[in-house]
Image (tube, rainbow, N blue to C red):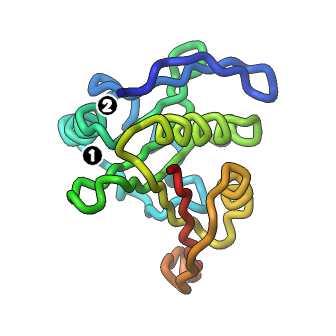
């Protein structure tokens, strides 16, 4: 069962459409990600590392569309511009198919208005209704206080910290691992 599209009103009154990605979204996803990924402090990519071809991105999105234990949500502004995304990447190993790793991103102009909460809560609700998923996990920069607050608010629990996982601009950052048991 894939995600049913829905309109969401954010804290600031703006309305967005939350829906499952399609393969055809590849043309929008590449510039969307490139538009925020290198500007954000807490994204573990360096300039130029996210540079898929259109065909490569279509193949990635096709996997999300076809895999029953995976979800890729996009948030669209009223003009159809993608402003945020969330992916639950379901593990394909038989003994781990009940688990998914989580990732999310959004443009700065849409941060602080409830978009992250809407994306994550809808994904968690989908996961709880999904017969196969039982556990969602993530890794986050230890300094990402707003991300940590969001994950804790939704119910994620910290289960580990690894020092010096990320090295950006000559500076090390610790990683915190978190999980949420769905069932």
**In the drawing, what numbered circle is on residue 26?**
2
Mark 2 residue element: helix
**Position in image of residue 171 (x %, y %):** 58, 81
**Position in image of residue 45 (x %, y %):** 44, 62
Residue under the point 20% across and 38% down: 59
Residue under the point 68% across and 18% down: 15
Q: Nearer the viewer, mark 1 or mark 2?
A: 2
The CA span between labels 1 and 2 is: 10 Å
- The residue that disc 1 covers is 52
Report if the CB atoms under discs 1 and 2 are less than 8 Å apart: no
Horizontal arrangement in the rendering, residue 169 relative to residue 154 (left or right)? left
Q: Vertical placement of 110 versus 5: above or below?
A: below
Question: In the orientation shown, which residue stands out farthest toward the right?
Answer: 12
Q: Quadrant of the N terminus?
A: top left
Horizontal arrangement in the rendering, residue 69 relative to residue 104 (left or right)? left
Q: Classify 10 Å Cα crowding around label 1: few (below 14), some (14-19), many (20 and above).
A: few
Q: Which residue occupies the foreground of this view, 90 or 32? A: 90
């Amino acid at each position: 069962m894939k995600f049913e599209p829905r309109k969401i009103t954010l804290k600031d009154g703006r309305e967005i459409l939350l829906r499952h990605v399609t393969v055809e979204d590849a043309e929008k996803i590449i510039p969307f990600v490139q538009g925020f990924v290198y500007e954000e402090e807490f994204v573990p990519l360096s300039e130029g590392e996210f540079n898929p071809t259109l065909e490569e991105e279509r193949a990635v999105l096709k996997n999300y569309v076809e895999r029953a234990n995976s979800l890729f949500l996009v948030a669209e502004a009223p003009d159809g511009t993608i402003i945020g995304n969330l992916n639950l990447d379901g593990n394909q190993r038989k003994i781990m198919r009940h688990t998914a790793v989580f990732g999310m991103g959004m443009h700065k102009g849409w941060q602080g208005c409830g978009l992250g909460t809407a994306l994550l809560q809808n994904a968690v609700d989908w996961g709880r209704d999904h017969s196969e998923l039982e556990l969602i996990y993530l890794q986050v920069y230890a300094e990402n206080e707003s991300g940590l607050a969001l994950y804790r608010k939704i119910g994620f629990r910290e289960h580990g910290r690894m020092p010096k996982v990320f090295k950006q601009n000559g500076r090390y950052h610790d990683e915190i691992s978190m999980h949420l048991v769905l069932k």
